Amino acid sequence: MPANRSKREPVSLFQPRSYFEVLPLNEIFPSPAQATEIEIGCGSGSFLVDYAEQNPDTNFLGIERLLGRIRKLDRKIQRRALCNVRVLRVEAGYAVQYLLPPKSIHAYHIYFPDPWPKKKHWKNRLVAPGLIPILMASLKPKGMVYLRTDNQGYFEQMLETFESAKQFRPINAPDSLTTIETDFEKTFHEQGIPTLRAQYQLSSS
Ligand SMILES: C[S@@+](CC[C@H](N)C(=O)[O-])C[C@H]1O[C@@H](n2cnc3c(N)ncnc32)[C@H](O)[C@@H]1O
């Protein structure tokens, strides 16, 4: 290992032994928890650290591809001495489909995923019918999916995606969750841009 490696690598970054095997969730976090939740595309992670601080009995894994944002999140985690937040630097679609153990995740937070506003790019959107079976494979029965976006068209696509999946039903988010804004959400609200939210629960079987 290079001598200055520890300075360059975020402490909270989890580096899997293999990217071709299911992640050992029990090795990612120092302590087992009552629940494991994921934020897909967590960015610099203000939501994740605020929510994790309020929920010390839950482990949170952020999935993010940009190292600069992971570094910012890592500084927040270190400042608050949070033991229940780790980050995985990998393409989120791949991670959810191939790296998460079956029926292991209590909730997914998908906040302000890239909206790909041009129609010819809509095929790149994360929240689309093809995501449903992928989420279902790793969600526990009664697991939750929380969604936020500023893009009206993408919001409609999110609603159509989940409303047409019989296994999910719309629910209200708990107050403890609704009061916490993400980094992008704060910026949108400061600029007077409204944002939209929806949340769904997987059926029990
Ligand atoms: C618009 S930002 C939102 C960040 C954060 N959720 C928030 O609300 O402040 C989207 C984030 O998702 C990350 N992202 C986009 N596509 C990704 C992918 N396929 N895999 C991992 N991260 C991704 C981006 O790097 C970016 O940090």
Image (tube, grey):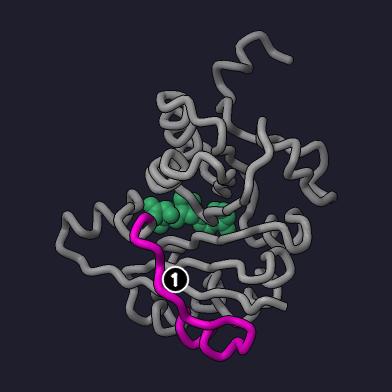
Q: Position of residue 131 (x, y in %)?
A: 63, 74
Seen in the picture, residue 137 relative to 81 is either above or below; the reply is below
Which residue shows up at 41% across the image and 24% down it? Answer: 79
Q: Circle 1 — which element? A: loop
Q: Which residues are magenta?
A: 158-176
- Quarter of the image where the C terminus is located: bottom right
Residue 163 falls inside the magenta stretch: yes
* Front position in the image: 165 or 31: 31
Q: Circle 1 is placed at which residue position?
A: 116
Seen in the picture, residue 74 relative to 133 is either above or below; the reply is above
Which residue shows up at 81% across the image and 51% down it? Answer: 22
Residue 139 relative to residue 69: left or right? right
Which residue shows up at 56% across the image and 45% down it? Answer: 58
Residue 3 relative to residue 55: left or right? right
Occupied quadrant, residue 128: bottom right
Seen in the picture, residue 5 relative to 49 is either above or below; the reply is above
Q: Position of residue 94 (x, y in %)?
A: 70, 59
* Front position in the image: 1 or 141: 141
Q: Amino acid at mark 1?
A: Trp
Disc 1 residue lies near ligand 1 with CB under 8 A: no
Please give the count of numbered marks on the rendered protein. Answer: 1
Residue 44 relative to residue 91: left or right? left
Residue farthest to the top, as pictured: 3
Residue 5 falls inside the magenta stretch: no
Occupied quadrant, residue 89: top right
Task: Give neighbour class at mark 1: few <14, some 14-19, many 20+ (Cα, 10 Å).
Answer: some
* Front position in the image: 109 or 205: 205
Which residue shows up at 55% across the image and 69% down it? Answer: 126
- Quarter of the image where the N terminus is located: top right
Q: Position of residue 153 (x, y in %)?
A: 37, 82
Q: Position of residue 170 (x, y in %)?
A: 47, 81
